[in-house]
Each structure stands twice: as structure tokens, then as C-alpha cells.
Image (tube, helix red, strand yellow):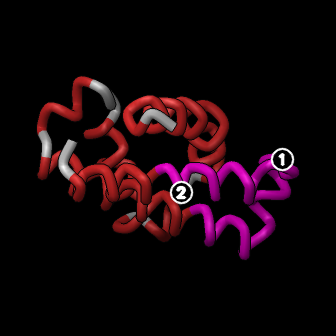
């Protein structure tokens, strides 16, 4: 694995772990009403999506190990360009369902 790709994957892993930390003691209602936490989580999703775009750009074969890579990039684009219509129930579902899986996939790739 290229050093640059490894660094990008580490950035994604850090962002996943941060999202999990930020939301560990929250439920959807608390998340929705806590502007500080929801803003931080949205920022981490933006980092994940942009970094995933760079990973795929550098190594197309990574999509075999990260089958949701394109969907992650699209999710980031929706958050950035549709900032005024973010559906926090969808964001919450991604936090609870997809972030743990993505973290595990990245940890496997990095042998963490």
C-alpha cells in the first residue's frame, strides 16, 4: 500500500473514532439538539468523504476492500451541498450502522 493511501486511511480511521466518541453517550434527539456535537460530526463526515475520494483516486483497487467508497463520497457531497436540508435521522443511522463497519474495514486494511 502506498504511503499516501495509508496516511489517508489513518485520517478516515481517526474521523470514525471521533464520531463514535462524540456520539457515544447521545441519542438521536440529543444529537439533533446539540449543535456543537452535530457540527463536529458533520465536519468529520466531510473529512471522511473527501479523504475517501483521494484514496480512490490514488488506488482504484481499494474499492474491493471498501465497497461503500463511492457511497461515502456521495454522502459527503450531500452534506456539503445540501447543508440546509440535512436529515439528521439519516445522519444518525449512518453513525450507528455504517461508521462501526467502516472503522472495522479500515482497521483491517491497516492491520490495526
Callout 1: few (<14), some (14-19), or many (20+) C-alpha neighbours within 10 Å?
A: few
Q: Is residue 31 left or right of residue 51?
A: right
Q: Residue at x 38, y 67 (%)?
A: 80
33 or 26: nearer the viewer? 26
Looking at the rendered structure, which numbered label has been put on residue 72? none
* Location of residue 60 in the rendering, given as x and y in whole percent from the top left corner: 12, 38
- Membership of 17 in magenta stretch: yes
The residue at the far bottom in this view is: 36
Residue contact at pointers 2 and 1, CB within 8 angstroms: no
Can you identify the residue that label 1 sits on? 27
Looking at the rendered structure, which numbered label has been put on residue 14? 2
Q: Residue at x 53, y 57 (%)?
A: 15
- Element marked by disc 2: helix
- Element marked by disc 1: loop
Q: Residue at x 72, y 73 (%)?
A: 35
* Location of residue 47 in the rendering, given as x and y in whole percent from the top left corner: 42, 63
- Membership of 7 in magenta stretch: no
**Res. 93 in view:** yes
Q: Nearer the viewer, mark 2 or mark 1?
A: 2
2 or 1: tag closer to the N-terminus = 2
* Location of residue 75 in the rendering, given as x and y in whole percent from the top left corner: 39, 49
**Quarter occupied by the N terminus:** top left
The quarter of the displayed image where residue 8 is located: bottom left
2 or 86: nearer the viewer? 2
The quarter of the displayed image where residue 7 is located: bottom left
Which span is picked out in magenta?
13-41
In this view, 65 is above or below 3: above
Q: Residue at x 23, y 31 (%)?
A: 63
In this view, 95 is above or below 111: below
Of helix, strand and loop, which mostly describes the magenta segment?
Answer: helix
Q: Is residue 2 left or right of residue 94?
A: left
Amino acid at each position: 500500500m502506498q504511503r499516501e493511501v495509508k496516511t489517508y486511511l489513518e485520517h478516515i480511521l481517526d474521523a470514525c473514532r471521533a464520531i463514535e466518541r462524540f456520539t457515544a453517550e447521545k441519542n438521536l434527539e440529543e444529537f439533533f439538539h446539540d449543535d456543537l456535537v452535530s457540527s463536529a460530526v458533520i465536519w468529520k463526515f466531510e473529512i471522511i468523504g473527501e479523504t475517501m475520494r483521494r484514496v480512490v483516486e490514488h488506488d482504484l483497487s481499494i474499492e474491493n476492500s471498501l465497497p461503500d467508497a463511492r457511497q461515502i463520497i456521495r454522502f459527503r457531497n450531500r452534506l456539503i451541498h445540501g447543508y440546509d436540508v440535512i436529515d439528521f435521522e439519516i445522519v444518525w443511522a449512518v453513525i450507528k450502522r455504517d461508521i462501526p463497519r467502516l472503522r472495522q474495514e479500515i482497521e483491517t486494511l491497516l492491520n490495526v
